[in-house]
Structures are given as structure tokens and as C-alpha cells.
Amino acid sequence: MPTTAFTTPFIGRTDELARLTRVLDRSRAGEARAVLVAGDAGVGKTRVLAEAAAHARDAGATVVTGHCVDLGDVGLPYLPFTEILGALAGDERFSGTLAAHPVVDRLLGAGGEGGKDADGRLQLFEGMASLLADLAATAPLLLVLEDLHWADQSSRDLLRFLLSRGIPRLARSPLRSGADASSAEGPAGRLAVFASYRADDLHRRHPLRPLLAELVRLPAVERLELRPMPDGEVASLVRAQRADPLPEVTVRRIVERAEGNAFYAEELLAATSGSAGGTESAVPSGLADVLLIRFEQLTDTAQQVLRTAAVAGRRVGHEVLSEAVELPDGELESALREAVGRQLLVPDGDNTYSFRHALIREAVYADLLPGERVRLHRVFASVLGRRGRPGESAAERAHHSRESHDLPDALAASLEAADHAGRLRAPAEELRHLEAVLDLWSAVPADARPDGADTVTLTLRASAAAARAGEAHRAVSLTRSALARVGTEDDTELAARVRYTLAGNLMRVDSLAAAFEYSSEALAMIPAEPPSRTWVWAAATHVMAANYVGDTATARRVAREALGVAEVLDLSDARADLLVSLVGLEGDGRRTAQGRARLREARDLARRAGNSAIEMRALFNVAIGAYESGDLDECLTSISEGLERAGHAGLLSSPYPLEMRYLRSLVLFTLGRWDECVEAAEADARRLPAAGGYALAPALSVALARGDLGAEERARTLLEGPFDWMATLVAGVLLTDAAVLRGDAVTAVAQVRATAQALVDEGETAPDVAVRLAALALAAVADTAAEARATGDEGGVRRWTDTGAELVELARSVAARGEDGSRQGPEGLAWLARAEAEWTRVTAAPGTGAWEKAVTAFGYGNVYEQARCRLRLAQALLAAGRRSEAAEQARAVRDTADRLGAVPLRDDVDGLIRRGRLGEAPPAADAVPALTARENDVLLLLARGRTNRQIGEELFISGKTASVHVSNILAKLGAAGRTEAVAIAYREGLIAPGQRPASG
């Protein structure tokens, strides 16, 4: 692989280089790692990476480098990765491995047309990760990505994929079966990625900023910031540049002006006259001036070559540059040799030249006269047009044509670049080029525009690219723009297509009423006779929109009619989509065996039509239907089928398989297979997209139930970033339960209200999860009401009873009608039973019967929640004097808690067994901890019914300090409230009747 040659010794950066080499050593041992190297322009990122790369090569690693290029608004999809693959393709050692991975041909431009959807893009990403795994299994591999601040969005997305899923997955992968075991010395995780970027280029809205914030939170990724070098190191660097001693005044002046920037120092020194007898040369104050002084030392011919190269970009191929400058070969080679000798250009191994630093190129480019700049851009556009290279050359040509004001060619090249980006599954770049086309359209004469294109169709295409790129709101905006341009007189089918496309995009951003309005308009514009594909898809969209706004009668009627037309036209994928919708609209739908059989029929239709998105929709509905019916075993079987199918298609990270992953972890949690749940989440975390964090929620539930105090904070991170319905739902459950476990009724109730409000639009009913949320919060409310009752706080009793009534009514109302009008399944009914049982605790009513119903209701398979209800049942039985039954329930709870590793639950049941004397004495470790003297004083006043304020007054301490002592006493005694703490204290002999505080 080509390397960059440096003529001066490596000085300073000892700690930074040591960190990089440690990462390389860890990756060579099988722990895949990544480092994001940040620093200002010229601070020394390239040099440090070059030294680390040399260390890697010396240790036997393969090192490949990819560069990002600044072409203004023009994006070159996957450019650094294309460069990396090109370098690997030139090495015979990897020919067999590369041949086994189609991703190589696709990124190098040899692939077929393929699909342009997110599925194909995910397949490309999975293919790249698989290729890296195989390469790393053969030999340790270091990928170096330079100038990440110029990366195109597709490259950023691919890097996100590799670092968030590929890197962690490789770190735990065994050797692939296809690897040559004789040549492999370690696991497939022997991969390191070093990526550099300019920190001073990242303005507030720079597209790299959110990606960096996301990546640095990953366990396998660390950030290394190259700060300005100390003055002593800069001085050493300056002295090392010259064989002859430099005057100290010169060195000092350069150090002062360089301000710790190695490149500034080198450039300042290069502009200093060595024959000045130690005097300081007349160097301009700005770095650009320094760079241009050095540039102006070249001959006129070399200057012209460098100016032309600067217009091309950071790197330029020899042949392209030769055509652009139109010099005889000898003169061109002489000029290039001069520029290389002055260290302004660096020759690369693939017959290209790079500016030694981007700042050099920027300074030279900025120094061009306006007319000169336009002329040279026109030259490059002409050269690229003559060469006729597909793909990235179209993007470059579009850039040069725009800069040279050749708008017709810029439009044609932008459209060609959009086509190429679409074939490469680079929707962000496709969108950018299509928007450029739309911007140029009105400025280009009609006779110079591409044949067969119009602004409405192009805008629709741009909206589709935006949707595939995950820019849902941009897709809505573009489709609205198409709607403003389309007429209804000439092409009603196009007008209808715009409207139902807009409706589909609006549903993605939860603008449901507007979606229904536009889908209604679309359906009304196209007659059902004669049958047409446009009408079928308009109807399919309208069915979903009508269902979302609650007009199920319309949705059902249109779906049945459209299904008949789709059968006549033999539109298998439309039939599949309509079948899935109909199953959800009819009776219990997917909860019945008959409904799931129809969903499997839809799955088969979509599979035969090659529509993987609808196939995944059908498979997910089969699995969730089994879950909702309480058949958890069938649910797991269906999920396994869906994920296996998604894996074969390379679609494991697409939306419906992502929901299947969440559902799989949820079922494992419910069944009490917690270790499997955690293992599944760890495996999923290595490949989840940025918006898929909610799939890890069941594993966070395990952590919370096992007493992991950090689980609550990790749950809060699910709410970061743009609003996500599923993330809000699962975070609401986790945070409510965390507050309940802390005994914080105020926070628990506030979380229920906030979550329910966030999950519904104005006028909608609360979602089904509100039943669970209410039941959870009622536990904390019941505890707080009981404490208020025990202390004689009648106001508190009334306040918390009112809150409890609000919560139980919420649970009852939602369970009665459901968010979609269907009856509750076993899970919903179990949570309703739990809510009713907790309500008996709020009102101090006898609750054994209610808790028996709750225990039975969770018997559908929810092991943990059934155990929690058993604990409450045991408490109720004990209060009713049914000790033997209480002891039986308590033992069952302890067995479950031990098996699950649910430490808080085990502590609670042990406390009940001890306080109620329901079994043998607990081990010594479970004995009541000793109280301090001050805590004994506080406890005695608690026994006399004192409030925190009164305790503080009697003991001459603040009420806040008294509150802390009370909390410590409750924790030590394992009591849920003050009354229980006093009862435990009397039983354990901690206080005797009539005893008074020492200070009293």
C-alpha cells in the first residue's frame, strides 16, 4: 500500500502515539477498536497516523487509507471506501477474498442496477462488514480514513454502521469457516479504524457533529484530540528541519507564530530565508500568505500546473491533469517534480498527486482570479466529459460545470450523478444531486433540458430518495413541492400519485389527519374502472390512513375492493400489503390462528413478488399476533423465521426486523430467560441503527430488576434525539418502574402522565401501554398513601387516594376500549388485574382476592411480574392472618428471585419472611444492621409519631438532616414506610416501650 514519505524525524506526540499503538495491540489480539483523531488543520493528524500506520505494518498488519475530498455541495458516494477497496484490489494477496464479496464490484462501479431502496443499501453495508471480517481473519487490518469532515453522507452512514455494529461484532466473532486456518493467527476481530477530522471546521450545523456525538458513546470507539504542541516540541521540530543551526531568535519567532501547530511551524520556516544571517525574513502574518510565498518560488509553469491542480481538488490523477494543462509531457513532469520537491505536492501510488496539506490547495485556489477560476473549471468539465467515465466523474463534472456557469451541462451531469448515486444505494447523495437538478431547471433553456424529464417526476423521485435517506420531513416538503407543481387536467394519474405519496410520507411523521385528506383526494381522482395499478396503490395507502384516523369502516371497505382489483391485475405485492391491512381490520385479526394464516399467505405473495419490505411487514405481524394472543412459544418461532429470512436477504437492520429483535428480547424477558435476553441484546447492539436503541429496552429491564443503578440513566438516553414513538414508550415504562423501585411516587406519576401525553395526538385515546404504566405507578402511590395513613396525615391520604383513583380509572378506560378498539389480550388483562389489586392497597381494602386474580392473570408466561404479584399476595395473606399460605407464596417468590438474579425482589421477600416470621431465621448476613446513636434517637421519635420537622426541633438538627436519618433507618430495616419501621424495631428489640431518646 502506498505511504506518505516524511523527510523529518517524528517529534513529540509521545502520549498520543502510545495510545494509538495500544489500540493496535489490542486489535491485533482480537479486540476490534476505533479511534477518532481530532485536531485543528495542520496540527499533525496525518503525521501521527502515519507513525501509527508504520507501527502497524511493522507488526504485520495490512494498512489501507481512504481520503475524503472537498467538492463543495457535490458528494461522491462512499469515496474513501472506494479508494480503500481500490487499494486492496491492487494487492494479489486479497484477490480471493475480494472476489467472494460482490460489494467490491458495486462500490467500484461494476455492479448492476439493483434496487435503490434502503434494503439494497443495508445489503451493501452488511457486505462491507462481512468483507472486513474476512480480511481481518486473514491478517490484522488497519483502516485509516483522513479528513472525515469532508465525508459524504453515505460514507458517514457506512462508517456509523461499521463502528456501531461491525466493530463490536468483529470483536467477538470466531474465525470464519472460510478463512485459511494456517495463515490466521487470531480472531476475526483484528481490525482497527483510525479516522481523522478537523475540529476547527466543525461549525454548529456541520453534518459530522451528530455522528461524532453518537460514535464516541460506543464502547469500541474512543476519541483522541491532538492539542497544540508544547513550545519546546515545536522548537525541536523547527530545528530538525534544517541541517545548519538556526538563530534562536528565528526559532523563537516561529514558535510564537505557530502557536503549537506543526504545519504552521514548517510553513513559516520554509518561508524564512536561510541566508539571512540569523535575521528574521519578511514573512506575512497570515498562513495563506506564507503558503503563497512558497508557491510563488516555483517557476511560472509549475505555478500554472499547481493552480490547475487546485481547481481539481485535493487529489488529481496524472492523466486528467495532463489533459487539463495541455503541456508537453516533459514540461509537465518537470513542473510536477518541482512541486514535489518543494513539498507542495505528494505523489501517490495510484498515478495521482495530492496537495501535501489541504491548506495549501485552499490557499492556491483562493489566489486564482475569478475569470481564471471559471476558465479552469470549464476545462475540467470538458476533460471529464470527453473521458466519459461513469459514476463519480459525473459528480465532479457537475461541480465543475456549475462553477464554470455552464448550467445546461451542470444539469445533465447532476442528473447522471443522481442516477449513479441511486445505483450505489446512496440516497443522500442522490437527493443532493436531484435537488441540484431542480435548482438549475428554471435557469436552463427548455431545449437544453434532458428529454423525458419534468419537475414533478423529478421532485417525486427526490422525495423518495429523502425517505430512503431517513429524512422524513424533507420527503414531506419535497412532495408538497411536487403537489404545488402538478396539474390535474393533463395527467390525473401523476396528480394522484403525488397525493398518495404525500399521504404515505405524512404518515411517517405522524401527521395522520393530513395523510387521510390527501389519500382521499388521490383515490377520488382515479376511477376504479378500468382497473389500474395507480388506483390499487392509492387505495392501499388510503386504507392505512383511514385506519390510523379511526375510520375502520372505510378502511375495511376500500381494502376489500382494492384486493379484488389487485387480484385481477395480478399485483402480488399490493395483494400482500392489503391482506396485512385487512387482517388488522377484521375482528381479533392477527391474534387468531386464522388471522396469522392469512398473514403467512401475504408473506408468500410478497416473497414471490420480490417486495421484501412488505414481506417483513407480514412476518412481523405474524410474530406480534402470537405475542398478543399469549402464545409466546409460537411468537419466538415466528421471530426466528423472520430474522432468519431477513438475515438471508441482508435486511437485519431494516424497520420490521428491528421490531422483531425488540419483540424477541421482550419475550425472553417475559419468560424469565433473562440471560438469553441480555445476550440477544448484546448481539443486537453491535448492529442496531441509530434509531433502534429501543430494541435494547428488555435488557435494561433485566438490569433494573437485578439492581443495576445505572439502568435508569441508560434508559434516559433513549429519549435523546428526535422524537421516536417506540423509544418514548419503552423509556416511559423503564423510568416509571425505576421510580417505583425507589419509592418515589411523585416521579412515577409524573412519568406516567408525560409518557401518555407524548404518545398520543390531540383528541386520541391513551395507548394500551397506559394500563401497564398506571399499574406500576399505583404501587408507589399505594405505599405513599399507606405511610400517610400510618402517620395520621389525612391530607396526604386524600391527595394520594385521588391520584390513585385517577390512575386506576386510566387503566380501566384504556383496557375497556383499547387504542385501536380491540379487546385486551392476556398481557393487557394481567396489567389491569395488577392495577385493580394495587388500588385495594391505596384504599386499604382487603386485597387477597384481587392479588390472587393478578397472580393468575400473569400466569400466561410473565414470570417476573407474577412473582411481584405473589409478594403482594403474601403480604395480604399475612395481614389476613393466613400465615401458612403467605409462607408458601413467599417461598415461591424467593425461588423465582434467586433463579432470575432479581436482587431487590429477593431482598423484599426476605424482609417479609423475617418480619412476618414466615420461615426459618435468615442468615446472619440478613440480620438487621446496627443503627448509629443518632439513628436510634430518630427511631425513638418516629415511634412517637413525630414528623421530620418535629424530629429536627427536638434533636436540634435541620428537618432535611432528620429526613436523611429516616431514609437510612428505613433502608437498614428493610421497611417500606415509617409504621413498618417502628413495628420492625419493636419486634427486633431495637426499642422498648417507654424508652426515650438520649438527648430527650
Image (tube, helix red, strand yellow):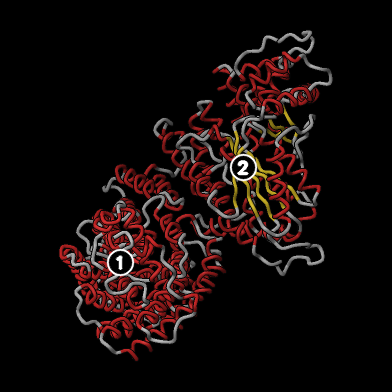
Residue at mark 2: 224
10 Å neighbourhood of mark 1: few (<14), some, or many (≥20)?
A: many
**Image coords of residue 385 (percent x, y):** 60, 35
Query: On the rendered structure, is 627 left or right of 39?
Result: left
Place residue 942 in its image quadrant.
bottom left
Query: On the rendered structure, is 990 left or right of 946?
Result: right
Query: On the rendered structure, is 795 left or right of 442?
Result: left
Point out which mark residue 525 bears.
Answer: none
**Image coords of residue 725 (percent x, y):** 35, 59
**Image coords of residue 465 (percent x, y):** 45, 49
> Who comes first in sequence, dot 1 or dot 2?
2
* As drawn, 972 above or below 385: below
Q: What residue is at 44 percent from the left and 70 percent from the top?
A: 929
Q: What is the three-letter code of the residue carrying label 2?
A: Leu
Residue at mark 1: 940
10 Å neighbourhood of mark 2: few (<14), some, or many (≥20)?
A: some
Q: Can you say which quadrant of the picture contains the N terminus? A: top right
Whether residue 606 is visible to the viewer of this picture, yes or no, is no
Front disc: 1 or 2: 1
Q: What is the three-letter code of the residue carrying label 1?
A: Leu
Q: What residue is at 44 percent from the left and 51 percent from the top?
A: 470
